[in-house]
Image (cartoon, rainbow, N blue to C red):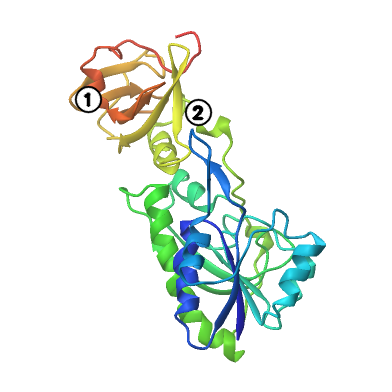
Amino acid sequence: MRVIFMGTPDFAVPSLQTLLNDKNLEVVAVVTQPDRPVGRKRVLTPTPVKVEAEKHGLPVLQPERLRRPESVEAIRALQPDLIVTAAFGQILPKSVLELPKLGCINIHASLLPKYRGGAPIHYAVMNGDAVTGVTIMYMAEGLDTGDMISKIEVPIEDSDTTGTMFDKLSLAGAKLLKETLPDLLAGRVQAVPQNDAEAEYSPNITREQERIDWTKPAKQLWNLVRGLHPRPGAYTLWNGEVLKIWTCAKPAESDRVPDGVRPGTVLEAGERGIAVATGQGVLRITELQPAGKKAMDAAAFARSGQLAPGTVLGTSGD
């Protein structure tokens, strides 16, 4: 079977490796996003999928827009029997979806129909879900609306962040793909339509979502911080500048805010980190990053005396 793989970030690499290890398949090309400038020096950098593909001598296509006629014709010329996508980053047009006789399948990092869209892992952690997973589905013209072929569940532990779940789900997706391929290639799959009434969406994270609202409960903010780690990161304002909050301890029910204390007020700054009042309970910061500096241990920063008890975080004038 002639297969085209479409993917971009590290998440997609194990799935590409699964296809390369299947003796029933020939990966005839890899499609990924164009090289982009990265870092402060804006160094033009290939995607992780491109790097992996070149290790194996695979042809690599990097269309700026897959729906352009010349891009569609390049795919058509490869005569794929199957197209497999994983975090590709572009919506496949109908003209591409109709090309392979076995269809186009997508490895999506959620238990559909929950968290359709571009940031399913972020939302699962930010919302405090106990479990998430991977769904392999047939692709349709809608946003992650296709019929579901197979699923695998992955627990979310208290120690997990979006970064750790990214890695876990990447491996789970590759495992699920390996288990699904035999039935798919033999025409034995029985895909199940999604219930659109149960659909939830996970659009890309906005800058406003990254900002900590101290009036919210501590547990909700703890989930936010680990859901935005390692990128883009949660932040608050301090002295009119951005203060990144990278990690926090899980809130303890015994930590209570004294009556009359404003949310965002530093209650304690010491070896246990920096404790901040919230709308319900206390959030203890363990790692932070002041503007223009590197990330650092909150206890070390507390020893500088710059975030003394009584300091109020979260407003531009503080």
Q: Horizontally, is 172 left or right of 138 in the view? A: left
Residue count near mark 2 (Cα–Cα under 10 Å), binned few <14, some 14–19, many ≥20 = many
How many discs appear? 2
SS of the residue under disc 2:
loop
Image point 50% across, 63% down: which residue?
A: 12
- Disc 2 marks a residue whose amino acid type is Arg
- The three-letter code of the residue at mark 1 reads Ala
Image quarter for residue 185? bottom right
Give residue 268's quadrant in the image.
Answer: top left
**Rendered position, 149 above or below 295:** below
Q: Residues within 10 Å of mark 1 (few under 14, many from 20)?
A: some
Split into 4 quadrants, where in the image is the N terminus? bottom right
| Of residues 283 and 119, the one drawn nearer to the viewer in this rendering | 119
Q: Are marks 2 and 1 in contact (CB under 8 Å)?
A: no
From the viewer's perspective, is residue 43 above or below residue 268?
below
Question: In the drawing, does residue 99 fall left or right of residue 272?
Answer: right
Q: Which mark is residue 299?
A: 1
Q: Position of residue 10 (x, y in %)?
A: 46, 57
Image quarter hosting the C terminus: top left
The residue pinned by badge 2 equals: 211
Residue depicted at x 72% and y 71%: 75
Identify the secondary structure beneath mark 1. helix
Image coords of residue 7 (percent x, y): 57, 62
Picture coordinates of residue 44, whole percent (x, y): 54, 45
* First of labels 2, 1 by sequence position: 2
249 displayed left or right of 45: left
Q: Is residue 207 visible?
A: yes
Q: CA distance from mark 2 to mark 1?
A: 22 Å
Residue 73 sits above or below residue 307 on the image: below
Q: Position of residue 123 (x, y in %)?
A: 51, 47
- Compare residues 291 and 116 and report the one nearer the observer: 291
The structure residue drawn at horizontal position 50% and vertical position 70%, both measured from the top left corner, is: 16
